[in-house]
Amino acid sequence: MSKPKTLLIDPRDDVAVALRALAAGEPLDAPCAGITTAEPIPAGHKIARRDIAAGEDIVKYGAPIGHAVRDIRAGQWVHTHNAASNLTGPLEYSYQPVALPGFPRRHETFMGYVRPDGRVGVRNELWIIPTVACANQTCEMLARQAMTDGTAAGLDGVYAMRHPYGCSQLGDDLANMRDLTAALVNHPNAGGVLVVGLGCETNQISSVQQALGTWDPARVRFYNTQEVGDELALGARLLAELAEHARRAVRTEVSMEHLTLGLKCGGSDAFSGITANPLIGRMADRAVDCGGTALLTEVPEMFGAETRLMERAADENVYRDIVELINSFKRYYLEHGQPVYDNPSPGNKDGGITTLEDKSLGCTYKGGSRAVTGVLRYAQPADRPGLLLVPAPGNDLVAITALMAAGAQIILFSTGRGNPMGTFVPTIKIGTNSAMSLRKAHWIDLNAGCIMEDMTQDEAADALWAIIGEVASGRRLAANERNGQREMTLFKTGVTV
Protein backbone atom coordinates (compact mmCIF):
# COMPACT_ATOMS: atom_id res chain seq x y z
CA MET A 1 0.00 0.00 0.00
CA SER A 2 1.44 3.39 -1.00
CA LYS A 3 2.07 5.99 1.65
CA PRO A 4 -0.32 9.00 1.74
CA LYS A 5 0.97 12.17 0.15
CA THR A 6 -0.85 14.64 2.41
CA LEU A 7 -2.19 14.85 5.94
CA LEU A 8 -5.37 16.55 7.15
CA ILE A 9 -4.99 17.68 10.77
CA ASP A 10 -8.62 18.66 11.39
CA PRO A 11 -11.66 17.94 9.19
CA ARG A 12 -12.49 21.67 9.24
CA ASP A 13 -9.15 22.61 7.64
CA ASP A 14 -8.86 24.41 4.31
CA VAL A 15 -5.32 23.10 3.85
CA ALA A 16 -3.53 19.78 4.07
CA VAL A 17 0.15 19.21 4.86
CA ALA A 18 2.46 17.67 2.24
CA LEU A 19 4.11 14.61 3.79
CA ARG A 20 6.80 14.68 1.09
CA ALA A 21 7.85 17.08 -1.62
CA LEU A 22 5.14 17.19 -4.30
CA ALA A 23 5.79 17.93 -7.95
CA ALA A 24 3.61 20.19 -10.09
CA GLY A 25 0.78 18.32 -11.78
CA GLU A 26 0.78 15.48 -9.24
CA PRO A 27 -2.67 13.99 -8.59
CA LEU A 28 -3.45 13.62 -4.91
CA ASP A 29 -5.32 11.03 -2.91
CA ALA A 30 -7.33 11.42 0.28
CA PRO A 31 -7.65 13.83 2.03
CA CYS A 32 -7.12 15.81 -1.19
CA ALA A 33 -8.72 13.34 -3.57
CA GLY A 34 -9.61 14.91 -6.90
CA ILE A 35 -7.02 17.69 -6.52
CA THR A 36 -3.90 18.04 -8.65
CA THR A 37 -0.97 20.14 -7.49
CA ALA A 38 -0.72 23.41 -9.36
CA GLU A 39 2.97 23.91 -8.55
CA PRO A 40 5.79 22.23 -6.60
CA ILE A 41 5.08 22.06 -2.87
CA PRO A 42 7.89 21.34 -0.36
CA ALA A 43 7.50 18.70 2.32
CA GLY A 44 5.73 20.05 5.40
CA HIS A 45 4.11 22.90 3.50
CA LYS A 46 0.41 23.50 2.93
CA ILE A 47 -1.74 22.76 -0.09
CA ALA A 48 -5.17 24.33 -0.55
CA ARG A 49 -8.07 21.86 -0.42
CA ARG A 50 -10.55 24.38 -1.78
CA ASP A 51 -10.62 27.72 -3.57
CA ILE A 52 -9.97 30.50 -1.04
CA ALA A 53 -10.84 34.07 -2.01
CA ALA A 54 -8.63 37.03 -1.13
CA GLY A 55 -9.53 38.20 2.37
CA GLU A 56 -10.94 34.85 3.49
CA ASP A 57 -9.60 33.11 6.58
CA ILE A 58 -7.38 30.07 6.07
CA VAL A 59 -8.13 27.29 8.55
CA LYS A 60 -5.57 24.79 9.87
CA TYR A 61 -5.68 22.92 13.20
CA GLY A 62 -9.41 23.72 13.07
CA ALA A 63 -8.76 27.46 13.54
CA PRO A 64 -7.75 30.46 11.40
CA ILE A 65 -4.01 30.77 10.80
CA GLY A 66 -4.43 34.03 8.89
CA HIS A 67 -6.09 35.11 5.66
CA ALA A 68 -5.47 34.90 1.94
CA VAL A 69 -3.92 38.05 0.47
CA ARG A 70 -4.86 36.94 -3.05
CA ASP A 71 -7.14 34.35 -4.56
CA ILE A 72 -5.87 30.81 -3.97
CA ARG A 73 -7.05 27.87 -6.05
CA ALA A 74 -7.39 24.29 -4.82
CA GLY A 75 -4.07 22.54 -5.39
CA GLN A 76 -1.93 25.66 -4.92
CA TRP A 77 0.85 26.09 -2.41
CA VAL A 78 -0.28 28.17 0.61
CA HIS A 79 2.53 30.09 2.24
CA THR A 80 3.94 33.56 2.90
CA HIS A 81 3.49 34.66 -0.73
CA ASN A 82 -0.30 34.42 -0.55
CA ALA A 83 -1.21 34.35 3.16
CA ALA A 84 -0.81 36.78 6.08
CA SER A 85 -1.49 36.93 9.82
CA ASN A 86 -4.73 38.19 11.34
CA LEU A 87 -3.02 39.22 14.57
CA THR A 88 -3.40 42.67 16.12
CA GLY A 89 -2.63 44.27 19.48
CA PRO A 90 -4.20 43.59 22.90
CA LEU A 91 -7.74 42.20 22.73
CA GLU A 92 -10.85 42.05 24.86
CA TYR A 93 -11.77 38.47 25.82
CA SER A 94 -14.78 36.93 27.49
CA TYR A 95 -14.67 34.17 30.07
CA GLN A 96 -15.96 31.05 28.33
CA PRO A 97 -14.73 28.03 30.28
CA VAL A 98 -15.18 24.54 28.96
CA ALA A 99 -15.99 21.61 31.21
CA LEU A 100 -13.01 19.29 31.33
CA PRO A 101 -13.57 15.61 32.04
CA GLY A 102 -12.11 14.01 35.13
CA PHE A 103 -8.91 12.01 34.68
CA PRO A 104 -7.83 9.06 36.83
CA ARG A 105 -4.85 9.63 39.10
CA ARG A 106 -1.68 7.87 37.96
CA HIS A 107 0.56 6.32 40.61
CA GLU A 108 4.12 6.13 39.32
CA THR A 109 7.55 6.71 40.80
CA PHE A 110 11.13 7.60 39.97
CA MET A 111 14.41 7.59 41.86
CA GLY A 112 15.21 11.14 42.96
CA TYR A 113 17.17 13.13 45.51
CA VAL A 114 14.85 14.31 48.30
CA ARG A 115 16.06 17.65 49.66
CA PRO A 116 15.48 18.69 53.31
CA ASP A 117 12.65 21.04 52.27
CA GLY A 118 10.80 18.20 50.51
CA ARG A 119 11.65 19.19 46.96
CA VAL A 120 13.17 16.49 44.75
CA GLY A 121 16.06 16.71 42.31
CA VAL A 122 16.82 14.42 39.38
CA ARG A 123 20.55 15.28 39.54
CA ASN A 124 22.93 15.87 42.42
CA GLU A 125 25.30 18.49 41.06
CA LEU A 126 27.32 21.42 42.34
CA TRP A 127 26.34 24.69 40.67
CA ILE A 128 28.65 27.70 40.63
CA ILE A 129 26.56 30.81 39.94
CA PRO A 130 28.19 34.14 39.11
CA THR A 131 26.20 37.19 40.17
CA VAL A 132 27.80 39.10 37.30
CA ALA A 133 29.55 38.34 34.01
CA CYS A 134 32.80 39.67 35.48
CA ALA A 135 32.93 36.53 37.66
CA ASN A 136 32.28 34.10 34.79
CA GLN A 137 35.87 33.09 34.17
CA THR A 138 36.56 32.55 37.87
CA CYS A 139 33.53 30.27 38.08
CA GLU A 140 34.59 28.28 35.02
CA MET A 141 38.11 27.84 36.38
CA LEU A 142 36.68 26.58 39.66
CA ALA A 143 34.41 24.12 37.86
CA ARG A 144 37.22 22.73 35.71
CA GLN A 145 39.45 22.30 38.76
CA ALA A 146 36.68 20.58 40.75
CA MET A 147 36.07 18.11 37.92
CA THR A 148 39.73 17.07 37.90
CA ASP A 149 40.91 17.27 41.54
CA GLY A 150 38.45 14.79 43.03
CA THR A 151 35.96 17.32 44.36
CA ALA A 152 33.27 16.04 41.97
CA ALA A 153 33.71 12.38 42.97
CA GLY A 154 30.37 10.76 43.76
CA LEU A 155 28.38 13.68 42.30
CA ASP A 156 26.71 14.19 38.94
CA GLY A 157 29.03 17.04 38.01
CA VAL A 158 30.18 20.56 38.81
CA TYR A 159 29.02 23.31 36.48
CA ALA A 160 29.59 27.05 36.17
CA MET A 161 26.48 28.96 35.02
CA ARG A 162 28.06 31.55 32.73
CA HIS A 163 25.87 34.50 31.66
CA PRO A 164 26.42 38.05 30.28
CA TYR A 165 24.53 40.10 32.88
CA GLY A 166 24.46 41.19 36.53
CA CYS A 167 25.65 44.78 36.19
CA SER A 168 24.71 48.03 34.42
CA GLN A 169 21.07 46.98 34.73
CA LEU A 170 18.11 49.01 35.94
CA GLY A 171 14.57 48.42 37.15
CA ASP A 172 12.92 45.18 36.09
CA ASP A 173 16.10 43.80 34.51
CA LEU A 174 18.00 44.10 37.76
CA ALA A 175 15.11 42.65 39.78
CA ASN A 176 14.78 39.78 37.30
CA MET A 177 18.51 39.03 37.47
CA ARG A 178 18.33 38.95 41.27
CA ASP A 179 15.26 36.70 41.23
CA LEU A 180 16.75 34.43 38.58
CA THR A 181 19.90 34.00 40.65
CA ALA A 182 17.84 33.20 43.76
CA ALA A 183 15.66 30.72 41.86
CA LEU A 184 18.73 28.88 40.58
CA VAL A 185 20.22 28.75 44.09
CA ASN A 186 17.03 27.02 45.24
CA HIS A 187 16.79 24.54 42.35
CA PRO A 188 16.54 20.95 43.65
CA ASN A 189 18.91 19.51 41.02
CA ALA A 190 21.75 21.24 42.86
CA GLY A 191 23.05 19.45 45.92
CA GLY A 192 25.33 22.39 46.63
CA VAL A 193 25.61 25.95 45.30
CA LEU A 194 28.48 28.43 45.34
CA VAL A 195 27.47 32.01 44.50
CA VAL A 196 30.45 34.05 43.31
CA GLY A 197 30.31 37.84 43.03
CA LEU A 198 32.82 40.42 41.96
CA GLY A 199 31.80 42.96 44.61
CA CYS A 200 30.94 46.18 42.75
CA GLU A 201 28.12 44.89 40.52
CA THR A 202 24.48 45.94 40.78
CA ASN A 203 23.32 42.33 41.32
CA GLN A 204 24.79 42.27 44.81
CA ILE A 205 25.12 39.07 46.84
CA SER A 206 23.25 40.83 49.67
CA SER A 207 20.29 41.42 47.33
CA VAL A 208 20.27 37.77 46.29
CA GLN A 209 20.37 36.73 49.94
CA GLN A 210 17.44 39.04 50.70
CA ALA A 211 15.47 37.45 47.84
CA LEU A 212 16.28 34.00 49.22
CA GLY A 213 15.11 34.87 52.71
CA THR A 214 16.57 31.75 54.30
CA TRP A 215 19.08 29.20 53.07
CA ASP A 216 21.04 26.25 54.39
CA PRO A 217 24.69 27.33 54.85
CA ALA A 218 25.75 23.71 54.47
CA ARG A 219 24.31 23.74 50.94
CA VAL A 220 24.86 27.36 49.82
CA ARG A 221 27.98 29.53 50.14
CA PHE A 222 28.73 33.08 48.94
CA TYR A 223 31.79 35.26 48.42
CA ASN A 224 32.99 38.31 46.47
CA THR A 225 36.29 37.89 44.66
CA GLN A 226 37.35 41.53 45.22
CA GLU A 227 37.28 40.98 48.97
CA VAL A 228 39.69 38.03 49.20
CA GLY A 229 43.30 37.37 48.30
CA ASP A 230 43.29 34.12 46.34
CA GLU A 231 39.75 33.75 45.00
CA LEU A 232 40.49 30.37 43.40
CA ALA A 233 41.87 28.83 46.57
CA LEU A 234 38.90 30.03 48.61
CA GLY A 235 36.45 28.84 45.95
CA ALA A 236 38.08 25.41 45.84
CA ARG A 237 37.85 25.07 49.62
CA LEU A 238 34.18 26.07 49.67
CA LEU A 239 33.38 23.68 46.82
CA ALA A 240 35.07 20.83 48.69
CA GLU A 241 32.86 21.54 51.71
CA LEU A 242 29.74 21.76 49.56
CA ALA A 243 30.63 18.50 47.83
CA GLU A 244 31.00 16.73 51.16
CA HIS A 245 27.50 17.87 52.09
CA ALA A 246 26.01 16.97 48.69
CA ARG A 247 27.45 13.45 48.74
CA ARG A 248 25.22 12.60 51.69
CA ALA A 249 22.17 12.66 49.39
CA VAL A 250 21.10 9.32 47.90
CA ARG A 251 18.48 8.44 45.34
CA THR A 252 15.17 7.43 46.88
CA GLU A 253 11.98 6.14 45.29
CA VAL A 254 9.50 9.03 45.14
CA SER A 255 6.14 9.72 43.54
CA MET A 256 5.98 11.33 40.11
CA GLU A 257 4.00 14.09 41.82
CA HIS A 258 7.42 15.56 42.59
CA LEU A 259 8.25 15.87 38.88
CA THR A 260 8.13 19.23 37.10
CA LEU A 261 8.47 19.17 33.31
CA GLY A 262 9.33 22.21 31.21
CA LEU A 263 7.81 22.26 27.70
CA LYS A 264 9.66 23.89 24.79
CA CYS A 265 9.95 23.82 21.00
CA GLY A 266 12.76 25.34 18.96
CA GLY A 267 13.90 25.14 15.38
CA SER A 268 10.31 24.16 14.60
CA ASP A 269 8.86 22.97 11.32
CA ALA A 270 5.35 22.15 10.14
CA PHE A 271 5.63 18.65 11.63
CA SER A 272 6.19 20.09 15.14
CA GLY A 273 2.44 20.53 15.61
CA ILE A 274 1.70 17.11 14.12
CA THR A 275 4.16 14.75 15.84
CA ALA A 276 6.44 16.03 18.62
CA ASN A 277 4.38 18.79 20.21
CA PRO A 278 1.21 16.68 20.66
CA LEU A 279 3.48 13.96 22.04
CA ILE A 280 4.96 16.39 24.55
CA GLY A 281 1.39 17.39 25.43
CA ARG A 282 0.66 13.80 26.33
CA MET A 283 3.70 13.83 28.64
CA ALA A 284 2.40 17.02 30.28
CA ASP A 285 -0.95 15.31 30.84
CA ARG A 286 0.71 12.22 32.34
CA ALA A 287 2.78 14.34 34.72
CA VAL A 288 -0.29 16.30 35.82
CA ASP A 289 -2.28 13.09 36.24
CA CYS A 290 0.47 11.90 38.60
CA GLY A 291 -0.03 15.04 40.67
CA GLY A 292 3.01 16.71 39.12
CA THR A 293 3.58 19.95 37.26
CA ALA A 294 4.05 21.00 33.63
CA LEU A 295 5.36 24.42 32.62
CA LEU A 296 4.41 26.04 29.31
CA THR A 297 6.14 29.21 28.11
CA GLU A 298 6.91 31.03 24.81
CA VAL A 299 4.09 33.52 25.32
CA PRO A 300 4.28 35.16 21.86
CA GLU A 301 3.81 31.67 20.42
CA MET A 302 0.46 31.51 22.17
CA PHE A 303 -0.84 34.47 20.11
CA GLY A 304 -3.69 33.20 17.96
CA ALA A 305 -4.15 30.09 20.11
CA GLU A 306 -4.56 31.80 23.49
CA THR A 307 -8.28 31.13 23.78
CA ARG A 308 -7.55 27.40 23.80
CA LEU A 309 -5.65 28.01 27.04
CA MET A 310 -8.12 30.53 28.45
CA GLU A 311 -11.05 28.14 28.12
CA ARG A 312 -9.12 25.60 30.21
CA ALA A 313 -8.41 28.02 33.07
CA ALA A 314 -9.07 26.35 36.42
CA ASP A 315 -11.12 29.36 37.55
CA GLU A 316 -11.91 32.94 36.57
CA ASN A 317 -8.88 34.35 38.42
CA VAL A 318 -6.55 32.13 36.40
CA TYR A 319 -8.42 33.17 33.25
CA ARG A 320 -7.80 36.85 34.05
CA ASP A 321 -4.12 36.11 34.67
CA ILE A 322 -3.84 34.45 31.25
CA VAL A 323 -5.52 37.45 29.58
CA GLU A 324 -3.05 39.80 31.26
CA LEU A 325 -0.11 37.56 30.32
CA ILE A 326 -1.08 37.61 26.64
CA ASN A 327 -1.93 41.31 26.46
CA SER A 328 1.15 42.36 28.44
CA PHE A 329 3.40 40.62 25.92
CA LYS A 330 1.53 42.30 23.05
CA ARG A 331 2.02 45.66 24.76
CA TYR A 332 5.71 44.84 25.18
CA TYR A 333 6.00 44.38 21.40
CA LEU A 334 4.06 47.55 20.61
CA GLU A 335 5.96 49.68 23.15
CA HIS A 336 9.15 48.76 21.29
CA GLY A 337 7.58 49.62 17.93
CA GLN A 338 7.40 46.01 16.78
CA PRO A 339 4.41 44.16 15.26
CA VAL A 340 2.99 41.38 17.42
CA TYR A 341 3.11 38.96 14.46
CA ASP A 342 6.84 39.29 13.56
CA ASN A 343 7.37 35.55 13.86
CA PRO A 344 7.95 32.77 12.64
CA SER A 345 11.70 32.71 11.98
CA PRO A 346 13.27 32.11 8.55
CA GLY A 347 13.93 28.48 9.51
CA ASN A 348 10.32 28.02 10.63
CA LYS A 349 9.13 29.37 7.29
CA ASP A 350 11.46 27.08 5.36
CA GLY A 351 9.97 24.22 7.37
CA GLY A 352 6.41 25.10 6.32
CA ILE A 353 5.15 27.45 9.07
CA THR A 354 3.55 30.51 7.48
CA THR A 355 2.14 32.80 10.19
CA LEU A 356 2.43 33.20 13.92
CA GLU A 357 -1.04 31.67 14.33
CA ASP A 358 0.16 28.65 12.33
CA LYS A 359 3.12 28.35 14.71
CA SER A 360 1.10 29.04 17.87
CA LEU A 361 -1.64 26.50 17.21
CA GLY A 362 1.02 23.80 16.81
CA CYS A 363 3.13 25.15 19.68
CA THR A 364 0.37 25.09 22.29
CA TYR A 365 -0.22 21.37 21.74
CA LYS A 366 2.73 20.98 24.14
CA GLY A 367 0.38 22.09 26.92
CA GLY A 368 -1.72 18.95 26.61
CA SER A 369 -5.39 18.94 27.58
CA ARG A 370 -5.54 19.46 31.34
CA ALA A 371 -6.63 22.57 33.24
CA VAL A 372 -4.35 25.61 33.42
CA THR A 373 -3.92 26.03 37.17
CA GLY A 374 -1.90 29.24 37.30
CA VAL A 375 0.35 31.89 35.77
CA LEU A 376 3.74 32.45 37.38
CA ARG A 377 5.90 35.56 37.56
CA TYR A 378 9.25 35.50 35.81
CA ALA A 379 11.76 33.48 37.88
CA GLN A 380 9.04 32.40 40.32
CA PRO A 381 9.38 28.72 41.23
CA ALA A 382 6.26 26.67 40.60
CA ASP A 383 4.01 26.83 43.65
CA ARG A 384 1.26 24.34 42.73
CA PRO A 385 0.72 21.24 40.59
CA GLY A 386 -0.98 21.22 37.19
CA LEU A 387 -0.26 23.11 33.98
CA LEU A 388 1.33 26.50 34.73
CA LEU A 389 2.20 29.28 32.29
CA VAL A 390 5.63 30.91 32.55
CA PRO A 391 6.27 34.43 31.19
CA ALA A 392 9.10 34.30 28.66
CA PRO A 393 9.49 34.84 24.91
CA GLY A 394 10.03 32.17 22.29
CA ASN A 395 13.81 32.68 22.15
CA ASP A 396 15.18 29.23 22.90
CA LEU A 397 17.85 30.11 25.44
CA VAL A 398 15.74 32.69 27.27
CA ALA A 399 12.79 30.29 27.43
CA ILE A 400 14.65 27.22 28.70
CA THR A 401 16.34 29.37 31.35
CA ALA A 402 12.92 30.63 32.48
CA LEU A 403 11.62 27.05 32.67
CA MET A 404 14.61 25.99 34.76
CA ALA A 405 14.12 29.00 37.06
CA ALA A 406 10.46 28.01 37.48
CA GLY A 407 11.63 24.66 38.84
CA ALA A 408 11.68 22.32 35.84
CA GLN A 409 13.96 19.40 36.69
CA ILE A 410 13.66 18.15 33.09
CA ILE A 411 12.80 20.02 29.87
CA LEU A 412 11.12 18.38 26.88
CA PHE A 413 12.30 20.23 23.77
CA SER A 414 10.92 19.45 20.31
CA THR A 415 12.79 20.43 17.17
CA GLY A 416 12.12 19.97 13.47
CA ARG A 417 14.99 21.88 11.92
CA GLY A 418 17.43 20.63 14.57
CA ASN A 419 18.71 22.37 17.70
CA PRO A 420 21.36 20.98 20.11
CA MET A 421 20.84 23.61 22.82
CA GLY A 422 20.24 22.65 26.43
CA THR A 423 20.38 24.29 29.83
CA PHE A 424 21.61 23.16 33.25
CA VAL A 425 18.83 20.60 33.66
CA PRO A 426 18.38 17.53 31.43
CA THR A 427 16.91 18.77 28.14
CA ILE A 428 15.32 15.86 26.29
CA LYS A 429 15.21 16.47 22.53
CA ILE A 430 12.29 15.13 20.48
CA GLY A 431 12.71 15.28 16.71
CA THR A 432 9.61 16.04 14.67
CA ASN A 433 10.65 14.22 11.49
CA SER A 434 12.80 11.21 10.69
CA ALA A 435 15.09 12.87 8.13
CA MET A 436 16.47 15.40 10.62
CA SER A 437 16.35 12.97 13.56
CA LEU A 438 18.50 10.45 11.73
CA ARG A 439 20.88 13.08 10.33
CA LYS A 440 21.42 14.63 13.78
CA ALA A 441 20.92 11.49 15.87
CA HIS A 442 23.49 12.66 18.42
CA TRP A 443 21.24 15.65 19.19
CA ILE A 444 18.00 13.68 19.50
CA ASP A 445 16.62 11.49 22.31
CA LEU A 446 13.45 10.35 20.51
CA ASN A 447 12.37 10.55 16.87
CA ALA A 448 8.67 11.46 16.89
CA GLY A 449 8.72 11.32 13.10
CA CYS A 450 8.08 7.60 13.53
CA ILE A 451 4.48 8.55 14.37
CA MET A 452 3.99 9.23 10.65
CA GLU A 453 5.64 5.94 9.71
CA ASP A 454 5.64 2.80 11.82
CA MET A 455 4.79 3.82 15.39
CA THR A 456 1.41 4.58 16.94
CA GLN A 457 0.88 7.65 19.11
CA ASP A 458 0.43 5.40 22.15
CA GLU A 459 3.70 3.58 21.43
CA ALA A 460 5.54 6.89 21.04
CA ALA A 461 4.01 8.19 24.28
CA ASP A 462 5.09 5.09 26.19
CA ALA A 463 8.60 5.33 24.73
CA LEU A 464 9.03 8.99 25.68
CA TRP A 465 7.54 8.47 29.15
CA ALA A 466 10.06 5.66 29.70
CA ILE A 467 12.91 7.98 28.65
CA ILE A 468 11.68 10.63 31.09
CA GLY A 469 11.65 8.05 33.89
CA GLU A 470 15.16 6.86 33.04
CA VAL A 471 16.53 10.41 32.89
CA ALA A 472 14.77 11.38 36.12
CA SER A 473 16.18 8.31 37.88
CA GLY A 474 19.72 8.89 36.66
CA ARG A 475 19.86 5.78 34.49
CA ARG A 476 20.19 7.82 31.31
CA LEU A 477 21.67 11.16 30.25
CA ALA A 478 19.71 13.50 28.02
CA ALA A 479 21.29 14.47 24.71
CA ASN A 480 22.33 17.90 25.98
CA GLU A 481 24.12 16.29 28.93
CA ARG A 482 25.96 13.84 26.69
CA ASN A 483 27.02 16.71 24.42
CA GLY A 484 27.94 19.19 27.16
CA GLN A 485 25.25 21.66 26.02
CA ARG A 486 24.52 23.71 29.15
CA GLU A 487 23.67 27.39 28.80
CA MET A 488 21.49 30.09 30.37
CA THR A 489 20.57 33.75 29.99
CA LEU A 490 18.23 36.38 31.39
CA PHE A 491 15.03 37.64 29.77
CA LYS A 492 16.31 41.20 29.37
CA THR A 493 13.75 43.89 28.51
CA GLY A 494 15.24 47.21 29.57
CA VAL A 495 18.12 49.66 29.40
CA THR A 496 21.80 48.82 29.85
CA VAL A 497 23.75 51.60 31.56
Image: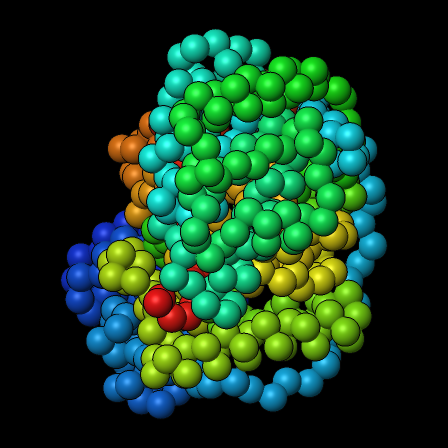
Instruction: Tell me which residue sits at (55%, 54%) in the image.
Output: 178
Q: In this image, 85 relative to 42: left or right? A: right
Compared with residue 106, is residue 152 higher up or lower down, i.e. above or below? above
Q: Quadrant of residue 307?
A: bottom right
Residue 117 relative to residue 421: left or right: right
Left/right of residue 114 with respect to residue 125 in the rendered view:
right
Q: Residue at x 50, y 14 (%)?
A: 151
- State the image coordinates of residue 473 (x, y, percent, origin top left): 63, 23
Query: How far from the left and from the top, in percent, is residue 24?
Result: 16, 62
- Front residue of 340 and 166: 166
Residue displayed at 52% across by 85% down: 90
Q: Quadrant of the C terminus?
A: bottom left
Nearest the viewer among 397 and 291 is 397
Residue at 35% in and 45% down: 134
* Scheme of colours in the image: rainbow
Q: How many labels were placed on the picture?
A: 0
Q: Nearer the viewer, residue 482 or 370?
A: 482
Figure quadrant of residue 54: bottom left
Residue 135: percent from left, percent from top:
39, 40
Residue 342 occupies quadrant = bottom left
* Quarter the N terminus occupies: top left
In the figure, 64 relative to 421: above or below? below
Horizontally, residue 101 falls left or right of residue 246, namely: right
